[in-house]
């Protein structure tokens, strides 16, 4: 089992940047892919980005493409979500999730094995 903890959320003005971190503990020697999801009040959970175990394969939602970048540092067992040019529509609780295996994980949150507790991102206009 892998435990995930997000950090880096906060309040930022539109056009600003934040970097979210997802730190892992537990069975981190087993391959796992990581996805970032977000959920705004009154809305369904939305896929944001995902990265494979090696870090060589990534996917990013069209809504954030060109603004958000996902990366990982396996030495630090941490996955990052760099968010630039933030917009008020990006306001949400951001969650990282893990999927056992070495391939790029799915965009469907139902297929992930474990989740972090979430971190709030608020973008003011």
Image: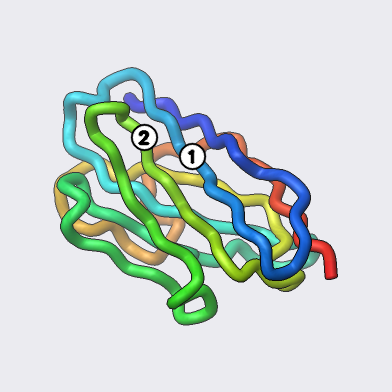
Q: Residue furthest front?
A: 16
The image's colouring method is rainbow
Q: Indicate the position of residue 35 as horizontal and vertical percent values.
A: 40, 53
Residue 51's quadrant in the figure? bottom left
Q: Indicate the position of residue 89 as horizontal and vertical percent values.
A: 72, 72
Q: CA distance from mark 2 to mark 1?
A: 7 Å
Q: Assess disc 1: are there few (<14), some (14-19) or many (≥20) residues with their C-alpha within 10 Å of its C-alpha.
A: many
Residue 70's quadrant in the figure? bottom left
Of callouts 2 and 1, the N-terminal one: 1
Task: Establish if 30 lies above or below 16.
Answer: above
Q: Residue furthest top?
A: 26
Q: Residue furthest bottom?
A: 62
The residue under label 2 is 78
Q: Secondary structure at mark 1?
A: strand
Position of residue 4 in the picture relative to residue 100 (left or right): right
Q: Indicate the position of residue 59 as horizontal and vertical percent values.
A: 32, 68
Q: Residue at x 23, y 28 (%)?
A: 75
* Image quadrant where one finds the C terminus: bottom right
Position of residue 103 in the picture relative to residue 10 (left or right): left
Q: Residue at x 53, y 48 (%)?
A: 19
Q: Residue at x 42, y 26 (%)?
A: 3
The residue under label 1 is 21
Residue 122's quadrant in the figure? bottom right
Mark 2 touches mark 1? (CB < 8 Å): yes
Q: Assess disc 2: are there few (<14), some (14-19) or many (≥20) residues with their C-alpha within 10 Å of its C-alpha.
A: some
In this orientation, which residue lies closer to the viewer: 8 or 101?
A: 8
Position of residue 77 in the picture relative to residue 37 (left or right): left
Q: Indicate the position of residue 96 as horizontal and vertical percent values.
A: 48, 45
Q: Residue furthest right?
A: 125
In this orientation, which residue lies closer to the viewer: 48 or 75?
A: 75
Q: Residue at x 60, y 62 (%)?
A: 45
* Image quadrant where one finds the N terminus: top left
């Amino acid at each position: 089992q892998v435990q995930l903890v997000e950090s880096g959320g906060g309040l930022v003005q539109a056009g600003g940047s934040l970097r979210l971190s997802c730190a892992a503990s537990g069975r981190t020697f087993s391959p796992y892919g990581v996805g970032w999801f977000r959920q705004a009040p009154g809305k369904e959970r939305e896929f944001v980005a995902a990265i494979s175990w090696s870090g060589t394969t990534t996917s990013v939602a069209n809504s954030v493409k060109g603004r958000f970048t996902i990366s990982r540092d396996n030495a630090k067992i941490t996955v990052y979500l760099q968010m630039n040019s933030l917009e008020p529509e990006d306001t949400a609780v951001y969650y990282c999730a893990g999927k056992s295996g070495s391939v790029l994980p799915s965009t469907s949150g139902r297929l992930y094995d474990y989740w972090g507790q979430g971190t709030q991102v608020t973008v003011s206009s």
